[in-house]
Amino acid sequence: MKKQVKPESLIPFAEQLATISGEIVRKYYRKSFTVEHKTDSTPVTLADKEIEQNIRAYIHNMYPEHGIIGEEFEPTNPDAEYKWIIDPIDGTKAFMMGKPIFGTLLSLVQGSTPILGIIDQPILGERWTGVQGFATNFNYDPIRTRLCSDISLAMLSTTSPNMFKDMDFESFERVRRKVRYTGYGGDCYAYGLLASGFVDIIVETDLKPHDFCALAPIIRGAHGYFTDWQGNPINLHSDGRVVACGDKRVHEQVLELLNA
């Protein structure tokens, strides 16, 4: 029989991974460094690669039976029951521009279900930690999303309107026209702000598992809602179209608009 892992027991280990990442981030932040471009034209820096390499080595040393799926390198043991999902710098463009609204994303997935997640912003010294079955913490203090009774009162955030193509853009526009305010930018940082009660809705598309797995335990543990556009819980195999809301009433309204 396989030994079951209690995700809360791995919080200190996961936070050590975030600390390793933060030390490397601070070494490169607002310094001159080489930027490469992947085949999809997205940028990658030396910091991205160094962070993921160091985190991978630390995981392999402590939990060699666990799988690792990262943004910058090929998966290791991807069929393992427990897998670590790594986005070394979510918001690389913000990092390159010297804006402290990027973050390292770390998640532990059991099967296909995210059970632990961290958003770490080392420049501001901010860390959100979510674990299945427990309240989400911001710098070790419990947090929760804010109540919002109607979409007309809501603050919407998305990284960029350019991520929405064709019918997805039309769906997003139906939501955007109904909210009170819309803000752009932030990548994973916006999800931390939603968990902390400063944003009501996030709608995005074209995300990869390393972009969204860590967010699921954080949003859920802050009493929020995080699903795909059909209302299904987010898992490792979700299609990359996500909705995060702080209030169930607004979440239902957003889903109705997206699927109108």
Image (cartoon, rainbow, N blue to C red):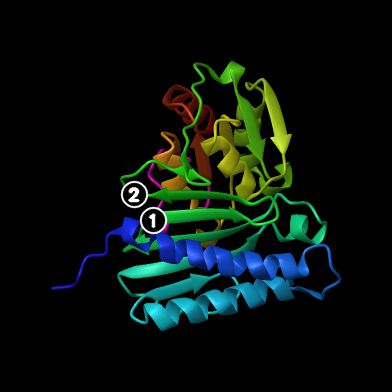
Q: Which residues are magenta?
A: 226-241
Question: How would you rate the neighbour count of disc 1 (Cα within 10 Å): few for under 14, some for 14-19, many for 20 or more?
Answer: many
- Look at the picture and state if 171 lies above or below 218: above
Magenta stretch contains residue 228: yes
Q: Amino acid at mark 2?
A: Gln
**x and y percentages locating residue 106 in the rendered image:** 50, 61
Residue 114 badge? 1
Residue occupying image coordinates x 48% and y 78%: 58
Q: Is residue 205 visible?
A: yes
Image quadrant where residue 78 sits: bottom left
Question: How would you rate the neighbour count of disc 2 (Cα within 10 Å): few for under 14, some for 14-19, many for 20 or more?
Answer: some
- Look at the picture and state if 77 lies above or below 169: below
Q: Amino acid at mark 1?
A: Pro
Residue 132 badge? 2
- Residue at disc 2, secondary structure: loop
**x and y percentages locating residue 64 in the rendered image:** 37, 82
